[in-house]
Amino acid sequence: VLAEKGNHRHFMEKEIHEQPEMIGRTVSHYVDAFENRVHDISGLDFRGASRLVIVGCGTAAYAGEIARYWFGSLARLAVEVEIASEFRYRDPVFLPGDIALFISQSGETADTLEAMRLAAAAGVQTLALVNTAHSTIAREASLVVPTLAGPEIGVASTKAFTCQLSALACLAVLAGRHRGHLDRAQEAGHVASLLAAPGLMVRAIESEDEIEKLAQGIAGYPTVLYLGRNQYFPLALEAALKLKEISYIHAEGYAAGELKHGPIALIEEGMPVIVIAPHDALFDKTRSSIQQVASRGAHVIALTDPDGASALAGEAARIVTLPSGSQLTSVLLFASAVQLLAYHVAVYKGTDVDQPRNLAKSVTVE
Ligand code: G6P
């Protein structure tokens, strides 16, 4: 590999730390920073869209799940998100006015590529959100919307994921404008928040020492539960995936509101439960989930922001305070925290962080 690790022990750590720069590059590609507007993209018009169908595998699919909340709320655009291996074999229904978006870091994932071919054969416009400009998915798509994460070497995706989110956020703002749901000032507010994300993420990553101290406590447990609501629910799924991939600890992500429908039965003394708890409109509900698991003995680690931290004092065993972000950017900050947590648990356990067992960077065969 030609890429250098710099001062980092692993590519994954380097790539986590590169995120502020790469999300900045990606956002800059999509926005006009003087006008605080998202550029129009030739050939892309969300006005007549009846639905956005998003398809990917693994981390890329979770980026799509998070963006579903944004397209719905900013653009009143219905979104369906599906993993490519299911989508391609279930004879999916396409509707007139569908736009299909395929998310892939490598642009070579076999299932995602075949899913895209299926949509193209049905006459649906295909957008490729890819990190590799010369990939097969990029070549075959009707339109490429790039992420500018640079080469990602660590098998577990980090910066490609947050760049996918950054690009998706820009597209959701664009869709909001096209569909008349965002006025000039609202668009400017969202764009300004995206332009501020790199600086906030630098500060989020400064929590690394604090997060590293949590790693030992987690490394000794056979299972970890991640909880989140709203867009932080798919982030909880991604957080659990990161931990599984590189530390080999079983982890599950759950919607906090589903706690009583099953996972609460798993809680026993000392079990780590990591709760993504921004101080937003749903904070009180998340807080009540924290109380429910803590009262049953869970070791609660709350990832939150300054307002959430003061509200949760005494309720969670550990609190990690990240900067507060916007509707579109706080998920980026929480993403960097859960990546750092998985990374340090894996380092503590001594696994092969960049080349975890049984996994490949790009799954080009089924
Ligand atoms: C593999 C990688 C994951 C990635 C997934 C999709 O499983 O290990 O990190 O999320 O493939 O890859 P893609 O290149 O399509 O984003």
Image (cartoon, grey):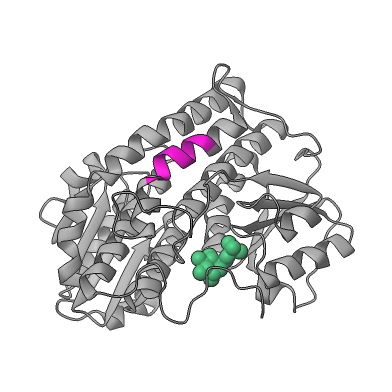
Q: Confirm whether the magenta stretch covers residue 251.
A: no
Which percent across, then down, holds residue 213?
14, 60
**Relative to 1, 321 lies left or right:** left
Q: Residue reaching furthest front?
A: 2
Give percent across and percent down for residue 294.
18, 68
- Which residue is pictured at 58% across the width and 53% down the height? 68
Instruction: Please tell me which residue is depicted at 51% across the width and 53% down the height of the picture.
Output: 160
In the rendered view, tell whether residue 113 sits above or below residue 323: below
- Which quarter of the figure has residue 80? bottom right
Question: At x 44% / y 66%, what residue is drawn?
Answer: 237
Does the image show residue 57? yes
x%, y% of residue 170?
59, 38
Q: Main secondary structure of the magenta part?
A: helix
The answer to whether residue 325 is left or right of residue 56 is left
**Residue located 67% across and 76% down the image:** 86
Above/below status of 22 relative to 363 = above
Q: Residue furthest left?
A: 314
First to last magenta residue range: 18-25
Above or below residue 213? Residue 201 is: above
Observer able to see residue 99: no
Nearer to us in this view, 287 or 319: 319
Question: Which quadrant of the view contains residue 171?
Answer: top right
* Residue 249 found in image quarter: bottom left
State left or right for residue 172 relative to residue 212: right
Q: Quadrant of the C terminus?
A: bottom right
Image quarter for ligand 1 equals: bottom right
- 313 vs 215, nearest the viewer: 215
Using residue 303 as the reference point, say whether residue 326 is left or right of it.
Answer: right
Q: Foreground residue, 97 or 25?
A: 25
Residue 290 horizontal/vertical position (percent)? 24, 62
Count of labels shown?
0
